[in-house]
Amino acid sequence: MFQEGLYSLIVNTPAITALLGTARSDEEDGLFYILAIPEPSMPYITYQRLSGVPQTFSFEGANALQDARFRFSCYGASQRSAVLLAQQLKLLFATWIGTLSEGTVVQQVMQVFEADDTESIPHGTIYACHVDFDFKYIDSESIGSPV
């Protein structure tokens, strides 16, 4: 499944792992699908699919090409730490195409959105930088013939 391969790619990218840290007090790797755990160590990233166009059709019938927009929300104790995480994601996906660890073939990645944000919490403020990417891929679990 695409999300699993995406997760593996990100947590195995040394520049991102260096920012997230390997000796985290929450004993996690700092990357969470949709929701973070309660009170995660800073910094951390959440990601989720915002929209998608499953299985398109061609003159030859159904195919496995997928198009999905994912949001990566980079959180930090300072705006700088959130932005640094977002920058590493942008660097990763600026030129990356290929096959993910679980077999999904990524054909194109385009950044389509970026925004800064803050969130008040009982102990202060969390800073965020949200970055959206549009992925075109052939999921390893898709039905149909690849295009």
Image (cartoon, rainbow, N blue to C red):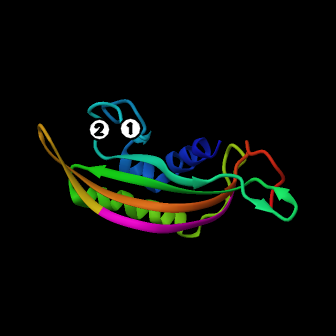
Which numbered circle lies on residue 35?
1
- Asked where in the image residue 42 lies, by quadrant, the reply is top left
Q: Which residue is mark 2?
A: 41
Number of other residues with Cα within 10 Å of mark 1, as a class: few under 14, some 14 to 19, many 20 or more: few
Hey, what amino acid is under mark 1? Answer: Leu
- Is residue 125 rendered magenta in the image? no
**Measured Cα–Cα span from mark 1 to mark 2:** 14 Å
Marks 1 and 2 close (CB-CB < 8 Å): no
| Magenta stretch: helix, strand or loop mostly | strand
Q: Give the residue drawn at x 67%, y 57%.
A: 137
Q: Position of residue 114 (x, y in %)?
A: 37, 66
Q: Which residues are magenta?
A: 105-115
Tag 2 secondary structure: loop
Q: Nearer the viewer, residue 90 or 73?
A: 73
Q: Quadrant of residue 147?
A: bottom right
Q: Is residue 14 left or right of residue 126?
A: right
Q: Position of residue 67 (x, y in %)?
A: 62, 58
Q: Is residue 123 above or below residue 43?
A: above
In the image: residue 79, left or right of residue 6? left
| Residue 143 placement: quadrant | top right
Quarter of the image where the N terminus is located: top right
Residue 139 appears at what percent x and percent y?
70, 49
Outermost right residue = 60
Residue shown at 25% from the left, 61% from the top: 80
Asked if residue 113 lies in the magenta stretch, the reply is: yes
Q: Residue at x 34, y 36 (%)?
A: 24
Return the residue nearer the eye: 35 or 123. 35
Give whichever of discs 1 and 2 has the lower sequence position.
1
**Under tag 1, what secondary structure?**
loop
Mark 2 nearby-residue class (10 Å; few <14, some 14–19, many ≥20):
many
Residue type (three-letter) at the residue carrying disc 2: Ser
